Image (cartoon, rainbow, N blue to C red):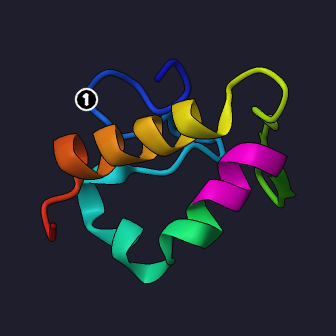
Amino acid sequence: MACHQKDGKGMNGTLAADFTTGRLNEKSDEELLKSISEGFTGSIGSMPAWKGVLSEDQMKAALAYVKKTYNPAQ
């Protein structure tokens, strides 16, 4: 959670999403898992790919944790 911070609000000036806004509901779990697995680059930074570092089950568990812990709309 280093980039997204312990409170889930992300870091200013980075691509790290603020998990507390409810925006997680704008994307499907499949889209979110693809972002975790493959990473991506945007206009303000990039998110590293976790494929090969985390197993698919670990990525699913991380997503479930984030949605349960930080997503107010869940």
Q: Nearer the viewer, residue 62 or 8?
A: 62
Q: Is residue 52 magenta?
A: no
Q: Position of residue 63 (x, y in %)?
A: 44, 46
Res 5 → quadrant: top left
Res 50 → quadrant: top right
Provide the secondary structure element on which disc 1 rests. loop
Q: Position of residue 30 (x, y in %)?
A: 60, 69
Q: Compared to 60, does 52 lie above or below? A: above
Q: What residue is at 58 percent from the left and 61 percent from the top?
A: 32
Q: Nearer the viewer, residue 52 or 24?
A: 52
For residue 23, side relative to residue 47 (left or right) = left
- Looking at the rendering, the stretch of residues picked out in magenta corresponds to 33-39
Q: Compared to 39, does 53 lie above or below? A: above
Q: Compared to 8, does 36 lie above or below? A: below
Q: What residue is at 82 percent from the left and 59 percent from the top?
A: 42
Q: What residue is at 50 percent from the left and 77 percent from the top?
A: 28
* Any part of residue 6 in sight: yes
Q: Residues within 10 Å of mark 1 (few under 14, many from 20)?
A: few
Q: Position of residue 20 (x, y in %)?
A: 25, 53
Q: What residue is at 50 percent from the left and 34 percent from the top?
A: 11
Q: Nearer the viewer, residue 44 or 7?
A: 7
Residue at numbered disc 1: 7
